[in-house]
Image: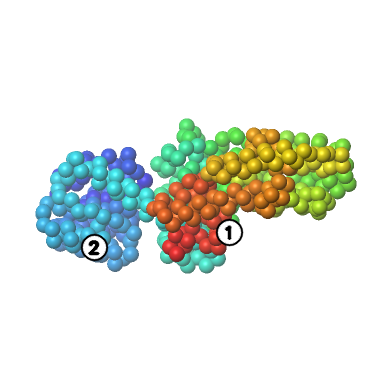
Amino acid sequence: MYSVMIIDDEPWAIKGIKNVFNWEKYGFEITGTFTSVHKAIEFINEECPDLIFTDIRMPEISGLELMRMTKEKELDAEFVVVSGFAEFAYAQEALRYGALDYFLKPIDIDMADPLIEKLALHFSKKKSVRNNLILEALTLPDKSELNRLTPFFDRSSDDYFRVLVIYSNSEKKAYKNLKFFDRKQTLEIDFGSRKTLYILKSDQKSELEHDLDYTVFEGLDIKVIGISSISTNYEHMAKLIKEADLAASHIFLNEEKGMFEYEPRFTLVKPLIDEISAVIQEHKFDEMDYSIERVVDFFRQNHLGMGEVVYLWNQVVSVLVGTYYEELKDMELDFLNYSELKERFENFESLCSFLYDILIYIKQLNGHTVNEGDINAYFSQMVKYIDTHFQSRLYLKDLSAKFYINQVYCCQFFKKNLGKTFSEYVTELRIKKACELLKHTELSIEEVATKVGYFDYYYFNKVFKKQCGITPTKFRKS
């Protein structure tokens, strides 16, 4: 919610402004009303509201002087000026000081909805730009830019930090109006159309340990909530964000809704990896089926998370490529992080299915023949489909079933015919389209990400930078 304060030396005018707008519908909340400018200034300094409605002519300090004082203190507050004087000079002066709009009082009720819609759009765009800059600054070693963008990380006190990542089932994000933590102690950042990041801070570690109650979120359209560990060092913010996202990625293993805390348990999965490695390296083909089939059950029984999934994938890939390099050199067997795994596979069962197909392929190598003519025809159809549907969620398992090609042969044909993997091909299509949209439209970067098939802005930002060498924000500026 965007906080609003109203200043006017006439109480009836304040009442009129409060009643004429449907504040909550457009994401605004009135947090203070004042007839005294001096008391209003104290409130502004302490609370720094997002939006201030102010009269121009008031005793002692005018609305224009109030705007000037606020700007001099570099407080990030926006103004709408309301006056009983229909003088163009006042409007000019107000707009020159940076007012978003200028209206005569009493405000015409027919003008109320267009005004509040315009303000909501302005704050949405402003928040989007700020989100992008903060997200980029959080990943930089030098935190000076982060300190410039937000006072949240003020180091004058020794605070504890914890991160929440919330995935929603829809774009409405009904949970955003909840006050599950002190607003002044919370930094909210949109990660995507259905994903929100909350950085919580407190000078008491116990507050961050015990105040997070999932019952607060029950009944809301929430898919999953991930919670990081606690740290006193804001230099570790990127690590905390990763932990919270890994915890939220529990949904990749299990569709169960809930709140999950980050808890690394790599030692539990190591014996399973050793077992699979031995089967591969010692060519125990008869045991391959059993080893992979029981992986899903093992992870569920031991309540393992996304960190362990990444560990399993990278270890097994290392053994597979090291043992059967020539046979598997055209497969999509790369070391991947958790975001890349979620982008490539629909869920954990799908990941295990791919590994199973790889092992079956190895097992059947000696006597298996393939009719390449049929596969080529189906593969061409698949590529045409990808070219026109790359904005959608695409998984190799689904495509291989749709076009009657085994996943393993799909990998081989991408490398053989296109010179790149399936993932590389889709990524190039998406980023090429993203560049076009950034150049030729005024869509926000989050909207661009969604349009090209990325529903996680944070991941889109990383992929774009890897492909283009700069962030989407810098690309648009250049």
Residue 144's mark?
none
Can you give x and y, in whole percent of width and height, for residue 286 in the image?
A: 87, 37
Q: Quadrant of the C terminus?
A: bottom left
Can you give x and y, in whole percent of width and height, for residue 446 in the image?
A: 46, 50
Residue on which disc 1 sits: 466
Question: Can see residue 187?
Answer: no
- Whether 143 is drawn above or below 231: the answer is below
Q: Quadrant of residue 248?
A: top right
For label 1, count other residues whose C-alpha is less than 10 Å away and answer few (under 14), some (14-19) or many (20+): few
Can you give x and y, in whole percent of width and height, for residue 43 in the image?
A: 29, 55
Question: Can see residue 93?
Answer: yes
Residue drawn 76% across and 52% down? 329
As measured in the structure, the alpha-carbon distance from the residue carrying label 1 to the one carrying label 2 is 41 Å
11, 402: nearer the viewer? 402
Residue drawn 77% across and 42% down? 358
Residue drawn 63% across and 49% down? 423
Which of label 1 and label 2 is nearer to you?
A: 1
345, 53: nearer the viewer? 345
Residue drawn 68% across and 39% down? 377
In primary-sequence order, the first of circles 1 and 2 is 2
- The three-letter code of the residue at mark 1 reads Lys
Q: Secondary structure at mark 2?
A: loop
Residue on which disc 2 sits: 97
- The three-letter code of the residue at mark 2 reads Tyr
Can you give x and y, in whole percent of width and height, for residue 338 in the image?
A: 63, 49
262, 251: nearer the viewer? 251
